[in-house]
Structure formats: structure tokens, C-alpha cells
Amino acid sequence: MSTSEIATVLAWHEALNTRDIATLVQLSSDDIEIAAPEHASQGIPALRDWAESVDTGFVPGRMYYRGGVVVVEENLYRSPAEKDLEREASAFRVVSDQVVSMFRHASLQRAFEATGLRESDRVADK
């Protein structure tokens, strides 16, 4: 297991949730891919636009790792007092301590199907 990839993904979540765009950019590759069921985009300008428009916080939960891919089950909320609005998952590819892709999925199962990860790839709780 690589703690480096996991640490990068956790720092990426922190930067997104605090709207620290400069740190988010530092943690991302120049050609980062961002995708969700309703859209896809690529590059730092697209990352900035997306991060500045997001009105949801992403609290990392269970994490799974194999071969540079990190899947994170997330609790989404619209305000800090409301931590369990919805549960989804994101799949990250991390190379050299930078996120090169982040794909949003409606559920942990969908993220597993897309990445080939499974329950046995679970990382010990942080």
C-alpha cells in the first residue's frame, strides 16, 4: 500500500472542502481529468471552474487502494452541520503525488465496477 497516494487524495479533499484552490492546483497534474455522470473536463482551468462552482463538501470515508488508484466513499454535505446529505464515491489516479484523474460515481459499487477494485482493497481506517 502506498501512503503517498492516500495522503495526496486526503490533502486534495481538504483543499477542495476549504476552497484552497492554490493547493488543489498544486496537488493536481496540468492535464487532470475530472468526470461525473453529467460532465467531463480536463486541465487546470477546468479544475478551477469546477472547484469554484461546487457547493457541496466531500467528507472522505472508507478508502480502497491498488496500483495508483484510490477509491473513496464520501459523505456529501451542503453545510458543515449537515454531514450525511448523500453518499457517493470518487476514483482517483495518483502519479508522483499528483491527482491525474478524479471520476465521480453514484455509489461505491459503481466505482468498484469502473476501477476493478473490491472490498479486499480496503485501507485500514485513517
Image (cartoon, rainbow, N blue to C red):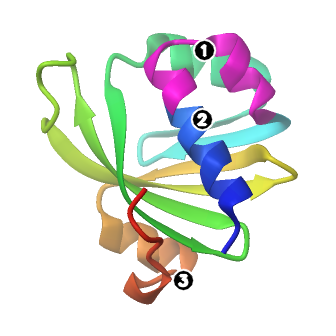
Corner quadrant of residue 94? bottom right
Q: In which quarter of the image is the C terminus?
A: bottom left
Any mark on residue 11, and which? 2
- 20 in the magenta segment: yes
Nearest to N terminus: mark 3 or mark 1:
1
Q: Circle 1 sits on which residue?
A: 49
Residue 46 visible, this angle: no
Residue 19 in sight from this viewpoint: yes
- Is 37 magenta? The answer is no
Q: Residue at x 72, y 45 (%)?
A: 99
Residue 74 located left or right of residue 31: left
Question: Secondary structure beneath disc 1?
Answer: helix
Question: What residue lies at 70% left-to-right and 67% top-to-bottom?
Answer: 2
**N-term-proximal mark, 2 vs 3:** 2
Residue 7 as seen in the image, left or right of residue 53: right
Element type at mark 2:
helix
Q: Do the residues labelled 2 and 1 touch (CB within 8 Å)?
A: no
Crowd class of label 1 (few under 14; some 14 to 19; many from 20; radius 10 Å): few
Above-or-below relation of 9 to 54: below
- Magenta residues? 14-28
Give amino acid for label 2.
Answer: Ala
Q: In this view, does 100 lie above or below 16?
A: below
Q: What's the distance in space between the residues labelled 3 and 1, CA to CA?
A: 30 Å
Give the percent coordinates (x, y) of residue 7. Answer: 63, 48
The residue positioned 44% from the left and 84% from the top of the image is 118
Q: What kind of residue is marked 1?
A: Asp
Please tell me whether mark 3 or mark 1 is closer to you in this view: 3
